[in-house]
Image: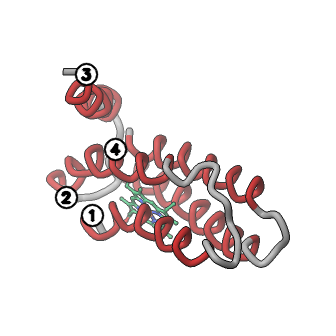
Amino acid sequence: MIAPMRRLLPAALFLGLSCAAGVADDAAKVRLLMGRNDRLKLEIQLLTAEKDPDRAIDERIGVMIRAVKEATALRPLKDAARNDLLPGLSVQALADLESLRGLRWSPQTREANWNRLEAACATCHLRVR
Ligand code: HEC
């Protein structure tokens, strides 16, 4: 009972918040948030070459999570049907990003961790871009 409620709540919230929002505005906001996400991803890539990067990487994943949450309340795309997909995809992507919190980044784990990060971003991009 609790699990379906948790899945429905973001969708309900999203509908409530997005009714008044203009598409052009939302597209610009999402581009800004995603541009930042891209920069954070690049920073993470560079950090993996450093000693003990775990905390700095974790902080950046936290910022990404906030950006994706913010993007969830927007309708950036011209196609309404694709906008409707975003909240559901976002729930999945956020769960994947949350699962990356507190990971140990080492030369041994780097590749697997990185692939998980890319997959979290791709959750939306494969469907809505
Ligand atoms: C909730 C779904 C969602 C998630 C998760 C997501 N994105 Fe996006 N992203 C979008 C949408 C929607 C667009 C398209 C915006 C447009 O075309 O106006 C986009 C576009 C982009 C763009 C292109 C921006 C531009 O200027 O056109 C980049 C870069 C990007 N995302 C990076 C990322 C990164 C890095 C992550 C992982 C941290 C990520 N995104 C996760 C939904 C998502």
Q: Is residue 79 above or below residue 118?
A: above
- Residue 92: where, in percent of width, then height? 33, 49
Label 4: how many residues lie within 10 Å, few (<14), some (14-19) or many (20+)?
many
Determine whether the residue tagged by mark 3 lies in a helix, strand or loop. Answer: helix
Residue at disc 2, CB closer than 8 Å to ligand 1: no
Cα separation, mark 1 vs mark 4, equals 14 Å
Mark 1 and mark 4 residues within 8 Å of each other at the beta carbon = no
- Residue 3: where, in percent of width, then height? 25, 29
Cα separation, mark 3 vs mark 2, equals 31 Å
Query: Which residue is tagged 2?
Result: 79
Name the quarter where the N terminus is drawn: top left
Q: On residue 19, which mark appears?
A: none
Disc 4 residue type?
Val
Determine whether the residue tagged by mark 2 lies in a helix, strand or loop. Answer: loop
Query: Which residue is tagged 1?
Result: 128
Q: Earlier in the sequence, mark 1 or mark 4?
A: 4
Cα separation, mark 1 vs mark 3, equals 28 Å
Cα separation, mark 4 vs mark 2, equals 20 Å
Between disc 3 and disc 4, the foreground one is: 3
Query: Which residue is tagged 3?
Result: 2
46 left or right, relative to 111:
right
Q: Is residue 84 above or below residue 32?
A: above
Query: Which residue is tagged 4?
Result: 91
Residue placed at 55% from the left, 58% from the top?
32
Residue placed at 29% from the left, 57% from the top?
77
Label 1: how many residues lie within 10 Å, few (<14), some (14-19) or many (20+)?
some
Disc 2 residue type?
Asp
**Figure disc tally:** 4
Q: Residue furthest left?
A: 81
